[in-house]
Amino acid sequence: MKHITLPYLQEALSLEVAVSNLLGIFEPNDLTTSNENIITEALRNPLGSESLDAFLEGAKRVLIIINDATRPTPTPAMLEALLPYLQKHQIADTEITILIATGAHRGATEKEFVQLLGKFAPRLTRCCVSHDARQTEDLIHLGDTRNGTPIILNKRLFASERIIVTGSVEPHYFAGFTGGRKAFLPGVASYETITENHKLALSNRAHALALEGNPVHEDMMDALPHIKAPIFSLMAVLNKEQQVAAATSGDLTAAFHAAVEVAKEIFCVDIPQKADVVVSVAKFPMDINLYQSQKAIDNGALATKDGGTLILVSSCREGLGDEEFAKLLSGADTPQKAISKIEQGYKLGYHKAAKMAAISQRMQVQGLTMLKDATLAGLFIEPVHDLQEAVDRALERARQNGVPEPKLLVLPDGCVTVPNVKQVQ
């Protein structure tokens, strides 16, 4: 028997499976580095731009964009590397604005400032502003993208002389990758902009790893020329322990694409075949709600046979995270009816519903979460309460369907692990 331990809240879930049934445990690939000062070195070697010192020369007011608490971005370490440069150029804390790129998410809570700022929380919390996508007086309409999406962004982008963008880059199930341009759109965009941008996620060209021809990515890129202040970017790529494996800095696009290449190396994982049963885990902080944890469903589905069973493991500790996609799914008798309703009219969140409904048509989706059973069942997710029992039942169901030796595949970090069936030469 093989013993498997998986993260869940502050605990660990145990799973026992016969070796003959285990196809494999697939995590992001290891990327070895001997450099302990990865972020500092990245700042010393910017890509496609002048040095950070030259960038800050003569600046008095600086805007720093950071990710919100739904991302594992190492913001405290980034600030530790950045702040000495600002101090060197005599930029006082009172002239620094830290804009939290919430997109359409809620603002940061007092508790989350420690996660976001680390040891700098007592010093910098007063500098922080959470972007509010619905606060119309804080937004400005700059134009439209090639796809017709209105470019409406936070006015604070135009109140500072320099903009420093921080973030992390990993695969994203419809934007291709996180990071870089995503800090602006959807990071600090209006609710209307985010809605129109995310509607493009319904396109078949919008999927994990896709940039070229991806309309969601095109929107994000089209927003950049409208930002007039000079931009300096600092991007990190994390390993499976959520430690910094690589970092890039400099020109926003150059630093992003360099980080993308590293992210592919880490997060794209070859698997020998699809499995009858897949367990996909949404790790902290992506376990915050079902809206974020859905990424583990999307990636897990890539490794699951049609007719198989996909089991999501996520606490969803703050609930659904969005009501619209849940209302849509719970208001439909079948996944196909949900998809048909989306085609009649789009609301923000419906792209999640579309992805989940399409997956539910292909396989049985189950969920080990803190959500109420009735809530999950209304989303075409069968609630389970014991992982071992759920896996055993799923394997037995495969046997009853004619699979003599069903296979289990486990994704301990399902939100960012992108399985790819390796083609036999």
Image (tube, rainbow, N blue to C red):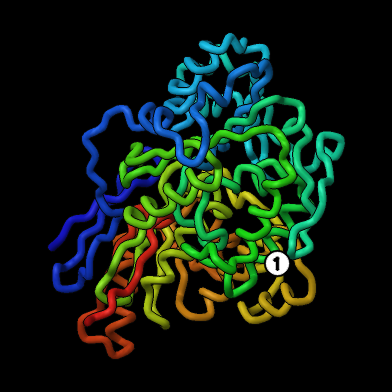
Residue 161 in the image, given as x and y percentages of width and height:
70, 25
Q: Label 1: how many residues lie within 10 Å, few (<14), some (14-19) or many (20+)?
A: many
Residue 118 in the image, given as x and y percentages of width and height:
46, 22
Residue located 75% across and 62% down the image: 347
Q: To which quarter of the image does residue 230 belong?
A: top right
Q: Which residue corresponds to mark 1?
A: 328
Q: Amino acid at mark 1?
A: Leu
Asked if residue 326 can be seen in this view, the reply is no
Tally of numbered tags: 1
Q: Is residue 137 above or below residue 191?
A: above
Q: Nearer the viewer, residue 179 or 274?
A: 179
Residue located 35% across and 37% down the image: 244
Residue 241 in the image, given as x and y percentages of width and height:
31, 42
* Residue with the most extreme bottom position: 402
Q: Nearer the viewer, residue 304 or 235?
A: 235
Residue located 21% across and 86% down the image: 404
Quadrant housing the C terminus:
bottom left
Residue 330 in the image, given as x and y percentages of width and height:
66, 67
Which element carries disc 1, helix, strand or loop?
helix
